[in-house]
Image (cartoon, rainbow, N blue to C red):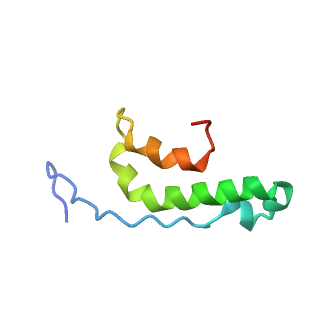
Amino acid sequence: MQFAGQRPAAKKQRKYKPPVSDVWESMGMDQYLSSRVVGMRKATNKMMSSIYQDLLPFIESTEFPNWLVDKIKPLGVNGL
């Protein structure tokens, strides 16, 4: 029970679990992409899923996680 003037109880942070693990694949859209692009997309999805918890502090921040650049470089998706 909450009384006037009290702060709401802190909610326990849930572990991220997407409703569909791979939207492109579940919709059958991979057939329209080259195998190279499918590989890049899957590698990017895997990397982002693995660092999701580390990115949470930056969601409402104006600070960029500079360590992310070193994780993106090997993917080859942005010209780095």
In this view of the protein, which residue sits in the foreground, 10 or 56?
56
Image quarter hosting the C terminus: top right
Q: Does 9 appear above or below 80?
A: below
Give the residue at x 63% y 44%: 77
Give the residue at x 39% y 36%: 64
| Residue 30 image offset from top left, x and y in percent | 79, 60
| Residue 60 image offset from top left, x and y in percent | 36, 40
* 25 left or right of 49 in image: right
In this view of the protein, which residue sits in the foreground, 54 or 36?
36
| Residue 4 image offset from top left, x and y in percent | 16, 51
Q: Does 12 appear above or below 56?
A: below
Q: How many marks?
A: 0
In this view of the protein, which residue sits in the foreground, 41 or 3?
41
- Does residue 16 appear anywhere in the picture? yes
| Residue 36 image offset from top left, x and y in percent | 75, 55
Residue 51 position by quadrant:
bottom left
* 21 left or right of 53 in image: right
Give the residue at x 82% y 54%: 34
Image quarter hosting the N terminus: bottom left
* 51 left or right of 46 in image: left
Give the residue at x 46% y 41%: 69
